[in-house]
Amino acid sequence: MPIYQMVCIAAHFPEYKHIHGLVSQSATHIMDAGGVVRKIDSWGTRILPQRMRRHGNYHEIGDYWTMHFDTAPRTLLTLNSIMRRDPRVIRWTVLKLASRPEDIAREGRRTIHGDAMDTLDPVDP
């Protein structure tokens, strides 16, 4: 299964439940289809670089978050469909990081080895 990273800008609401529901819905969709969610990060609430229109509303503030996941390309199509229809989503993009986890390790990305948890060494090719 390919490894992807999704970056999403969600509409800002005063209540946290809206962003929580969107992230939960996205992660659950991936896992229900047999995928793996590796990491979810929140980049916080930020002023948008320009006023954005989505679903008939203008937005000037957004909540940024990312999700790293592995899934089949067909599941990615349905995830894009969900994001397109959801009124909480302003913008999103999905980046393909690698076709397999081994591809990331071969590129020399840093990983943690053995008992030395405080030092990072590059993976030998």
Image (tube, rainbow, N blue to C red):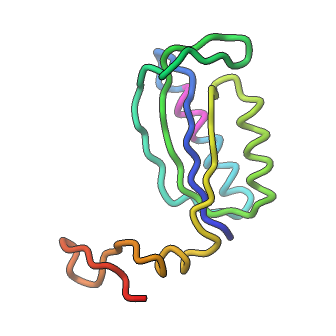
Q: Quadrant of the N terminus?
A: bottom right
Residue 121 locus on image (x, y percent): 27, 78
Residue at image x 64%, y 28%?
89
Where residue 74 sits, quadrant-wise, is: bottom right
Residue 115 position (above or below residue 38): below
Which residue is the extreme one toward the bottom? 125
Residue 30 locus on image (x, y percent): 67, 54
96 displayed left or right of 55: left
Which one is in front, 123 or 15? 123
Q: How many marks?
A: 0
Residue at image x 79%, y 47%?
78
Residue 21 position (above or below residue 14): below
Residue 113 position (above or below residue 48): below
Which one is in front, 109 or 73? 109
Q: Main secondary structure of the magenta part?
A: helix
Residue at image x 18%, y 71%?
118
Residue 21: within the magenta? yes
Where residue 26 sits, quadrant-wise, is: top right
10 displayed left or right of 109: right
Residue 105 position (above or below residue 30): below
Residue at image x 63%, y 49%?
94
Which one is in front, 17 or 87? 87
Q: Quadrant of the C terminus?
A: bottom left
Residue 49: within the magenta? no
Residue 22 locus on image (x, y percent): 60, 34
Residue 105 locus on image (x, y percent): 46, 78
Bounds of the magenta segment: 18-23
